Image (spheres, grey):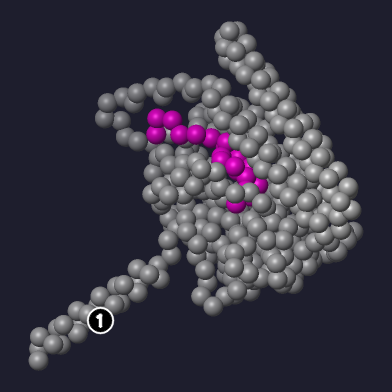
Amino acid sequence: MRSNTVIRLFALSLLIALAMVISAPSYGQVRVGVGVAITIAPPELPVYDQPVCPGDDYLWTPGYWAWGDDGYFWVPGTWVLAPEPGLFWTPGYWAWQDAGFTWIDGYWGPEIGFYGGVDYGFGYFGVGFVGGRWNGGHFFYNTAVSNVNVTIIHNTYNTVVEHNTTVSRVSFNGGNGGITARPSAAEEAAGREHHTAPVAAQTRQVEQARSNPQFRASENHGKPAVAATAKPGEFSGGGVVAAREAGRVNTAPAGNGGGRPEAHPGENPGGNAGNAERTNSAVHPKDLPPLEHQAAPNTGNPKTDEKYAKQQQKLEDQQNKDRQKLQAQQEKQDQKLEKQNADAAKKQAQEQQHQKQTEQMVQRHQQQTQQMQQRQAPRPAPRPAAPPHSAPQPHQ
């Protein structure tokens, strides 16, 4: 009799443990609220400045719109100490999946993975991260995109970064008006690596924002008074940055992934849901602004500078050829539709396909430029060895 009781208790404990494993969220994977179908698109990202980095080895984690019991609320961007040296933060993002919006968790890992093509700014321009790099167990900041006080933090370099200036502030991937980016092979590989969950400071940042009504989109209308903080949980004081420009807020569900944008003074409330800036997106390569010339290399070595300048020019020439080739291809397809007297629906479908092709080309060019800039970036000077028995300096 006693043995039967022991067996039942053991079996019950196994079932409970199994249920906990199944229900536990896996960071970097899809996390869905049980019984919740979110059909309203998240608001656009607000425009805000990055607060000054508070100290060595802090990494920037962008702000984003999260979902709570009262709808979307803003989680301020903030500087966070990584769980361990060598890890980077891959931001989370919203994705249109199975007739609803799903949040894909962010994670810490040795490489930057896919984050939906969302342009979070400050080095996260939709592909990869160019705000800094790890070297010798310490983080070095690219002051071209990171707000760092160089009189306090000396682990810095300056590499001008080119990115697509036509990218809108849409904050979700897929669906009507969403970003059409898809993960590259390298991003997919990064997604399969071992990941570390958000640190406790990040979790507190979310919970404090969730519990404060001023962060709700319904209250701040897409323009949070605290858009970013110098440190997690510090929602007042000199390290707080307010939004300079609101992101449009969607207020009605739409079956294909959008919503009616909330009207702001002086703006037209009409237009496609969840895609207020779609008319500003380039459909054809000819709609894109000219490629920006990269800053002239200045390594201090004339031969190296000449070599790097030739590499820059070669890449620029190739990217211009890519634009011309895609433009000619799209024009040929448009002419074919005209000869067929195609209806408006077919023409619109082709325009959407052309826009997707153009966006993919721009993202590919961004990645090529960033990779070359990283190869040409000057190597930081090695950190002098610490004297014997010296105590490590605390983070400020």
Q: Which residue is mark 1?
A: 12
Task: Pinpoint residue 161: horizontal percent, then vertical percent.
Answer: 65, 32
Q: Is residue 215 visible?
A: no
Residue drawn at x 54%, y 78% is 35
Residue drawn at x 40%, y 40% is 85
Between residue 83 and residue 53, name the one nearer to us.
83
Between residue 279 and residue 231, name the one nearer to us.
279
Kind of residue at disc 1: Leu
Q: Quadrant of residue 7?
A: bottom left
Q: Is residue 41 highlighted in magenta?
A: no
Is 36 positioned to the left or the right of 85 in the image? right
Residue drawn at x 65%, y 40% is 363
Q: Which residues are drawn in magenta?
A: 116-137
Q: Quadrant of residue 284?
A: top right
Task: Pinpoint residue 251: horizontal percent, then vertical percent.
Answer: 75, 70
Is 2 positioned to the left or the right of 46 in the image? left
Task: Pinpoint residue 168: horizontal percent, then vertical percent.
Answer: 73, 49
In the depicted structure, whether residue 334 falls above or below residue 172? above
Picture quarter with the N terminus:
bottom left
Between residue 354 and residue 265, name the one nearer to us.
354
Q: How many C-alpha atoms fall within 10 Å of the one at disc 1: few (<14), some, or many (≥20)?
A: few
Q: Is residue 114 visible?
A: yes
